[in-house]
Each structure stands twice: as C-alpha cells, then as structure tokens.
Image (cartoon, helix red, strand yellow):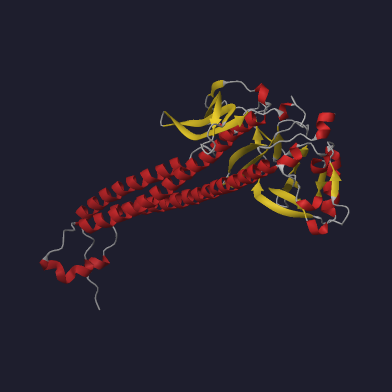
C-alpha cells in the first residue's frame, strides 16, 4: 500500500459492501416474517378495490430490496475499482522513480568504474545511490538490475557499432502471492573517455 | 367521515422493533457509506495529485538534466543548473570563448528552488533570467566553481526583479527518510563538487489528513546529466 493507514480504503469499502449485503438479507427475512405475521397475501381480484390500503407484497418488497442492493453494490464496486486502479497507477509512478534512480546511478558513474552486474534487491530493501534506504512508500517494491557489456548498433548506420554497457532495471512487487513487474527500464551507456578524465577535453 | 377500523390500529411491539432495527441499519449503512466515500475521495485526490505532480516534476527535471552540462551550485533547497547556449561541439573543443563565458541573456542559468508558502506547504520553483532586464555589457559572467558566488548572484538578481519565477509543482511536503520526517523537501545529487557531479534529483512528499489519519506518499526523483561536460577550469585545478 502506498499510503500509510491502518486499513486500506479498498478494504473499508469491501467491509461496507458486505454490510450492505448482510443488511439486504436481514431486511428481506424481517419483511417476510412481518408480512406473514400481518397475514398479508398477494393481491387478488377480490381485493382490487382496496388496493390502496394493502401493504407491499413480498414480490414488490423483494424487487425494491434487490434494486437498492444492486445500486449500492454497483456504487461501492465502482469506487473500489477506481481506488484499486489509482493505487496501481501511483505504484507504477513511484516504481518508475526507483528504476530511474538506478539508471541515473549508472549513467552518472565514471565509465571505468562500471562493472557487469546481476543483482536483486528484495522487496523493501532498495537503496538510493547514496546507500540510504528508500522511504516507506517504496517498501512494497523490489528491484532487479542487470548491467552487461555489449555493443549498440544503429539501424540507420550500417556497420556502426558502439561499445558500452546495457543497463536493465526492473521494479516489481508481489500481488496475490505472485511477483508482478511494475516498471522495466533499459538504457545504454556508451563508452566515454572525456568524462573519466583520461584525456583532457 | 369515519376512517376504517384497520387504519386506526396502532403498531404492534414487534412492528416497532423491526422498523427501528431496519431504520438503524439503514442509517448506519448510509453513514458508513458516506464516510467511506468521502475518505475514498480524499485519498483519490491525494493520489491524483501525487501522480500528476510527481510525473510533472520528473519530466521537468528529466528535460533540464538532458540540457544541463554542469550543476554550478548545490544546496538542499536550491540548485543551479547550467545549460550552455553553445553546442556540444563548440564547448567540447575546450575553446574558452565557447565554454568559459555564461551569457545571462541566453537562458543559460536555471535555478530550482523549494520555496515554503504561507500555508507551510512547499512549491518547487524554477527561476530563470529575464533577458530584457539584463543591462547591456553586463550579460557575461565567468565560470566559477564557488557555489557562494552563484548564491550571491541569485539573491542579487531575484531582489532586483531580474528573475522569472515559474512554479513547477505546489502542495509538496517534507519527505520521510529512515522513518524520520525531514524539515523540508530537498534536492539530491551525486557529489557536491560541481566539477564532478553528474546527477540531480529531488526528494519530496505529498501529505493529506483524513480524519485523524495522515496519508503520505514520498517520492525520490533522480536524473543523470546526459551530457555532462567538465569545464576546463576543473581540469586545470
């Protein structure tokens, strides 16, 4: 969960949804008992003239309750769905910053200090380039980094091949017990001489 | 007119009890729904702000870091980015005329600053020089690795009304680091030396209060200077 709170809003709405359904069944049972105790029966031809005084029939009551429950359920589900989708969107946004941070770390390094790497930071253990842990908002995420020496070819320039490191970063979380990829970034760091101060610019 | 005996009948105890229970249940459910909906809307607002403003800041810093060749001054609440107007080809040649001089009227200096508003929230602001306010003959500033020099220049130009203030994102809060809420949003970088630093970023949070609960979302953005270029003075020293 991105926002720290005791109970997730989605869970709160789920509880309310259950309450609505429970209320529906309770009200339905109460209505049936009540109608039975009052001796109310379905309208018949003989009762048509007094229809204005009769109570609701069981069917009418059922239909009204069903409509009410369905409407309330749809409303709650819509908000639930919106919240869940929004939490996913925020997770993706935050995950992108974690991936970008890792890529920036490699792009900002002296080329000569980069080495091949294949490492995974498990969920809740990601570190910033300064070695500090990320904040609580990142606690549900982990990160996989692969740095490989390779060459980059440019389709429009046949024969051109650039030496450098390919940096692949994947940020993931666990959802319903399974690992879910939130963001995958790939960058290429071409070999540079000037900035490593081997040669004065 | 006489009313029918049936309509005069009072409610039975069981009727009153059942109707009271049903009314209570309905009222309770309605209150719970309204409460949860207002809470959900508050959370949705905060998340929307976090997504939109976070992405906005990220894209802005990303764009600036693509054009920035050096960070001239770095402090927690203010950084100065140098975006030379000269092409890389010219500046990379080491020619003094191309890379030594900073033209104030060429949009080469961009200060990013976290500014605290009256309501205690923070706004990320970009300050750039208004070219029309630069006096002829005073548009050239020579490179300096001393961040104090740039801070003084910033204060002078801001107080003289020579800087354009462009808010990038408002409603920001201090981030949390290792479980401790910092005093203010801050910039992050690789190293304080302007001759070696090749990345710039920002750390901030979005905070909202829902009843007694504090909802918080922290963000740390970081971007490498894509075309970092070490000034000749750095190499000489």
Tell me which residue sits at (60%, 44%) in the image: B54
**Where residue B139 sits: x, y (%)?**
85, 52
Is residue A96 or residue B232 the one in the foreground?
A: B232
Q: On the rendered image, what quadrant is the C terminus of chain B found in?
A: top right
Tell me which residue sits at (73%, 35%) in the image: B229
Q: Most extreme residue toward the front, as rendered?
A: A159
Is residue A153 or residue A10 the one in the foreground?
A: A153
**Where residue B104 sits: x, y (%)?**
81, 50
Tell me which residue sits at (23%, 50%) in the image: A33
Is residue B55 or residue B142 the one in the foreground?
A: B142
**Where residue A57 sits: x, y (%)?**
21, 59
Tell me which residue sits at (54%, 35%) in the image: A154
Res A71 seen here: yes
Number of numbered callouts drawn: 0
Q: Is residue A169 above or below residue B159?
A: above
Q: Is residue B162 left or right of residue A142?
A: right
**In which image quadrant can residue B55 be found?**
top right
**Where residue A16 sits: x, y (%)?**
40, 45
Res B12 seen here: no
């Amino acid at each position: 969960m991105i926002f720290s709170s005791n109970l997730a809003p989605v869970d709160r709405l789920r509880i309310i949804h259950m309450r609505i359904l429970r209320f529906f069944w309770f009200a339905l049972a109460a209505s049936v008992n009540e109608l039975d105790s009052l001796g109310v029966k379905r309208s018949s031809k003989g009762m048509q003239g007094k229809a204005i005084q009769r109570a609701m029939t069981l069917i009418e009551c059922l239909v009204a309750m069903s409509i009410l429950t369905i409407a309330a359920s749809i409303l709650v589900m819509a908000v639930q769905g919106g919240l869940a989708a929004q939490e996913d969107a925020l997770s993706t946004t935050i995950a992108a910053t974690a991936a970008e941070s890792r890529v920036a770390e490699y792009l900002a390094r002296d080329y000569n200090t980069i080495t091949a790497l294949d490492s995974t930071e498990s969920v809740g253990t990601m570190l910033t380039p300064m070695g500090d842990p990320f904040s609580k908002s990142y606690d549900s995420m982990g990160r996989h980094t692969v740095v490989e020496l390779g060459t980059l070819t440019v389709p429009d320039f046949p024969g051109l091949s650039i030496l450098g490191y390919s940096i692949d970063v994947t940020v993931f979380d666990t959802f319903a017990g399974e690992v879910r990829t939130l963001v995958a970034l790939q960058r290429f760091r071409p070999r540079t001489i000037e900035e490593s101060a081997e040669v004065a610019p | 007119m006489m009313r029918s005996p049936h309509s005069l009948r009072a409610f039975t105890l069981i009727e009153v009890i059942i109707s009271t229970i049903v009314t209570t249940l309905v009222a309770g459910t309605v209150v719970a729904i309204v409460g949860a909906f207002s809470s959900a809307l508050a959370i949705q607002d905060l998340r929307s702000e976090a997504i939109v403003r976070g992405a906005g800041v990220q894209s802005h810093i990303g764009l600036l870091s693509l054009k920035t060749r050096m960070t001239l001054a770095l402090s927690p609440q203010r950084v100065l980015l140098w975006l030379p107007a000269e092409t890389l080809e010219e500046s990379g040649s080491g020619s003094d005329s191309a890379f030594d001089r900073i033209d104030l009227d060429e949009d080469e200096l961009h200060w990013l600053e976290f500014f605290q508003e009256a309501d205690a929230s923070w706004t990320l602001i970009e300050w750039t020089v208004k070219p029309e306010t630069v006096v002829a003959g005073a548009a050239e500033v020579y490179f300096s690795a001393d961040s104090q020099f740039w801070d003084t220049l910033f204060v002078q130009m801001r107080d003289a009304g020579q800087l354009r203030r462009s808010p990038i994102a408002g409603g920001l809060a201090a981030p949390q680091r290792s479980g401790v809420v910092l005093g203010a949003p801050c910039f992050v970088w690789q190293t304080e030396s302007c001759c070696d630093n090749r990345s710039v970023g920002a750390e901030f949070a979005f905070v909202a209060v829902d009843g007694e609960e504090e909802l918080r979302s922290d963000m740390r953005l970081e971007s490498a200077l894509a075309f970092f270029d070490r000034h000749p003075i750095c190499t000489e020293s």
